[in-house]
Image (cartoon, helix red, strand yellow):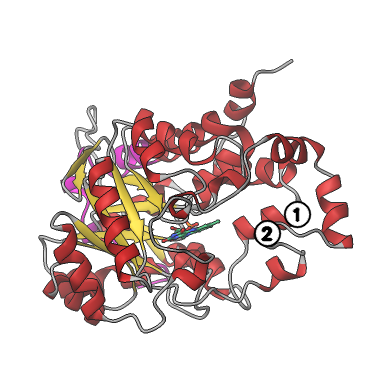
């Protein structure tokens, strides 16, 4: 019988891992991973927008030694792609966040732990000595917010990320239609879909109960999920959190040059251009379309991260050429996790990295600093 590693090695790109994940997950869980909000324009467009850019390869350059190393949020990475925050990761595989943190460290990149993780931030931090960041929201309870920030600092996260695009949950109709809810409540339809994936069900029944692990022992009382978030969040909240953190700080969910500039003015050291993978507001531009505007707004010294729609090494190359410092990925690593646990995530990251490296050689770039706007043109005839 083929080993899990052999099986993962048969996946030749992120789309192969996606197909494998779809085969393994019950429909409601796969839909939760994959689906965007409303008509899913943004989740589709995040990927499709990359097709509007073409790469003008430069010839006859020495690319015998390609250096992918970079620094993001004050941490050294072996290459410029890292893992976006994802809540309740154990729903895709019982090894969940711990597998993802280990895989990121093995791949020489950064893992972002979500505040809504199914394993506590302390357990995740203890699992990896690699680069890492903790992601939070503006929480309604200021005492709880301070507590979360203090715990992240004590657990050894060098950087903090504040997500600002999720005051309410996105309208993910396919997720609702397939009967998905957290905690899981079976309907007639979803019971059948879960029954079709007995291996997943067996893992679910044998594993620990899903919970928002960071809030289980919180001193302040916590409700569930969106009930925890401050509905009147403001720039003053963000500035206060930056002052509380006093270290590298990213604001995630920035979707305009204006907001990027404001983020820097209140002390953020990085902005993550993101529409939450198209899971929140639909009809937004794709993050890749906003890189130039955001880079112009924040200047050369701020980390600009592109998050959303990255599925290929060429996508990373295009994002860097537009002016991004690095990219981060959500679904690509979740496909890997669902398909094969830690080995699947490592496969996803290895594929993206080897594609990027090959594309850089083919485009005539031997280092990140060789990648610039001269490499790009818009699709179509001059
Ligand atoms: C299943 C799932 C759960 C997510 N949970 C969070 C979260 O807890 N916090 C957050 O800031 N973003 C969350 N995101 C958004 C990701 O961090 C990221 O912005 C998005 O996945 C990027 O798009 P991509 O999936 O096309 O790479 C989640 C995304 C998915 C798919």
Q: Position of residue 2 (x, y in %)?
A: 69, 18
The residue at the point 32 percent across, 56 percent down is: 148
Residue 373 lies left or right of residue 222; in this view the side is: left
Residue underneath mark 2: 31
Query: What is the quadrant of the C terminus in the image?
Result: bottom left
Q: Nearer the viewer, residue 118 or 19?
A: 118
Location of the N terminus (image quadrant): top right
- Which of these two is toward me, 166 or 291? 166
Specify whether 277 is left or right of 162: right
Q: Find out if the beta carbon at label 2 lies less than 8 Å from the nearest ligand 1 atom.
A: no
The residue lying toward the viewer, choosing from 353 and 193, is 193
Does residue 372 belong to the magenta stretch? yes
| Front residue of 168 and 281 | 168
Which structural element holds mark 2?
A: helix
- Is 241 on the left-hand or right-hand side of 279? left
Residue drawn 44% across the image and 50% down it? 217
| Up/down of 257 relative to 154, above or below | below
Q: Is residue 171 shown left or right of residue 363?
A: right
Question: Is the Cβ of the residue at disc 2 closer than 8 Å to that at disc 1?
Answer: yes
- Residue in view at x 63 percent, y 45 percent: 209
Q: Is residue 110 magenta?
A: no
Q: Which residues are magenta?
A: 356-382
Question: Hey, which quadrant is residue 110 in on the image?
Answer: top left
Residue ID for mark 1: 27
Assess disc 1: are there few (<14), some (14-19) or many (≥20) residues with their C-alpha within 10 Å of its C-alpha. many
């Amino acid at each position: 019988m083929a080993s899990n590693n052999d099986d993962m090695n048969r996946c030749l790109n992120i789309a192969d891992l996606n197909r494998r994940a779809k085969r393994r997950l019950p429909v409601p869980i796969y839909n939760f991973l994959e689906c965007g909000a409303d008509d899913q324009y943004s989740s589709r467009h995040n990927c499709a927008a990359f097709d509007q850019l073409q790469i003008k390869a430069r010839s006859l350059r020495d690319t015998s030694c390609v250096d992918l190393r970079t620094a993001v949020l004050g941490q050294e990475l072996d290459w410029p792609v890292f893992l976006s925050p994802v809540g309740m990761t154990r729903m895709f595989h019982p090894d969940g966040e711990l597998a993802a943190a280990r895989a990121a460290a093995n791949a020489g990149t950064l893992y972002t732990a979500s505040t809504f993780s199914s394993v506590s931030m302390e357990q995740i931090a203890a699992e990896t000595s690699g680069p890492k960041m903790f992601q939070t929201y503006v929480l309604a309870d200021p005492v709880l917010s301070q507590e979360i920030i203090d715990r992240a600092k004590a657990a050894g996260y060098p950087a903090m990320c504040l997500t600002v695009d999720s005051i309410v949950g996105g309208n993910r109709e396919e997720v609702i239609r397939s009967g998905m809810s957290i905690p899981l409540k079976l309907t007639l339809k979803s019971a059948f879909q879960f029954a079709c994936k007995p291996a997943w069900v067996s893992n679910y029944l044998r594993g620990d109960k899903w919970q928002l692990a960071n809030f289980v022992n919180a001193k302040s009382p916590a409700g569930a999920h969106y009930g925890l978030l401050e509905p009147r969040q403001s720039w003053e909240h963000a500035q206060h959190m930056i002052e509380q953190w006093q270290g590298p700080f990213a604001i995630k969910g920035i979707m305009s040059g204006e907001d990027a500039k404001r983020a820097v003015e209140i002390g953020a050291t990085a902005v993550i251009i993101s529409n939450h993978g198209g899971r929140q507001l639909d009809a937004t531009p794709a993050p890749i379309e906003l890189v130039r505007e955001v880079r112009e707004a924040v200047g050369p010294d701020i980390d600009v991260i592109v998050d959303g729609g990255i599925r290929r090494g060429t996508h990373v190359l295009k994002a860097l050429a537009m002016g991004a410092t690095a990219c981060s990925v959500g679904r690509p690593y979740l496909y890997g996790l669902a398909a094969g646990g830690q080995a699947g995530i490592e496969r996803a990251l290895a594929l993206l990295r080897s594609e990027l490296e090959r594309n850089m050689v083919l485009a005539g770039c031997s280092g990140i600093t060789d990648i610039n706007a001269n490499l790009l043109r818009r699709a179509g005839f001059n």
